[in-house]
Amino acid sequence: MNKLKTALPVALAALLSISTIAPVSAARVYNADTNVWEDTSVVVTRNKRGSPIKREIVAYETKLKPGSIVVETSERRLYFVLPEGKAIKYGIGVGRDGFRWSGQHRISRAAEWPGWTPPPQMRKRVPDLPAYMPGGPNNPLGARALYIGSTLYRIHGTSEPWTIGQAVSSGCIRLTNEDVTDLYERVKVGALVVVRQ
């Protein structure tokens, strides 16, 4: 009887510890780069590495007005034009093969912690995507989003900073959450965006 009294609390404690761990390990986050759902713990571990590219002010000669944005896709850099021949240079993630584009548009909208509605083409490629994901730290759009004209593309943050400097997205331009927040504070709706291959 004593063994049973001792074994019961131990078994109960083990069961409770498993039940408190299970919901955490069951949390899943959609990775738009790989088109799969991943455990949150994997994302948290990767996030600790941060972006390999730090933003900096650089010399930048252009005829574009201060406040304009230039995306150099092949360079994997975004330049926010400043006065007097300068720009803030940010590291970015760009579209993977088959998803790169170029053009000239204006910022049509800006949002903090935006919700995400995957476009129909993406939902066709990845049928288990939700129709909508509310904004927050696990949302693929990250902390801020700058909408580019009437296109499906955005300049946005990411919860995957290790992808900065790579060609991994479905066409959007991504920055770390820290960098997109910095850019968001500087950019005005209506600003020119030039995307170059």
Image (spheres, helix red, strand yellow):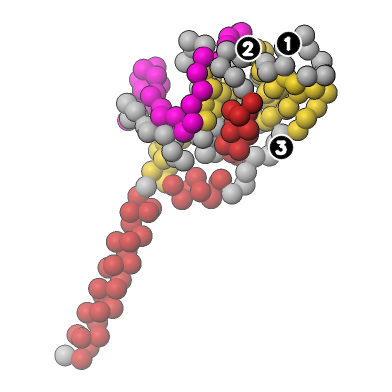
Q: Is residue 193 left or right of residue 147?
A: right
Question: Disc 3 marks which amino acid?
Answer: Lys
Mark 1 or 3 closer to N-term? Answer: 3
Q: Which residues are magenta?
A: 103-128
Can you give x and y, in whole percent of width and height, for residue 133 in the image? Answer: 37, 32
**Residue bearing mark 1:** 64
Give the number of the disc on residue 160. none
Label 3 crowd (10 A; few <14 / some 14-19 / many >=20): few
Can you give x and y, in whole percent of width and height, for residue 172 in the image? Answer: 54, 22
Tell me where residue 72 sits by quadrant: top right
Above or below, comparing residue 146 to residue 136 in the picture: above
| 101, 89: nearer the viewer | 89
Q: Where the N terminus falls, by quadrant?
A: bottom left
Name which residue lies at 59% across and 19% down. 188
Mark 3 or 2 closer to N-term? Answer: 3
**Residue bearing mark 2:** 192
Is label 1 or label 3 in front? 1
Query: Is residue 107 in view?
Result: yes
**Residue bearing mark 3:** 54
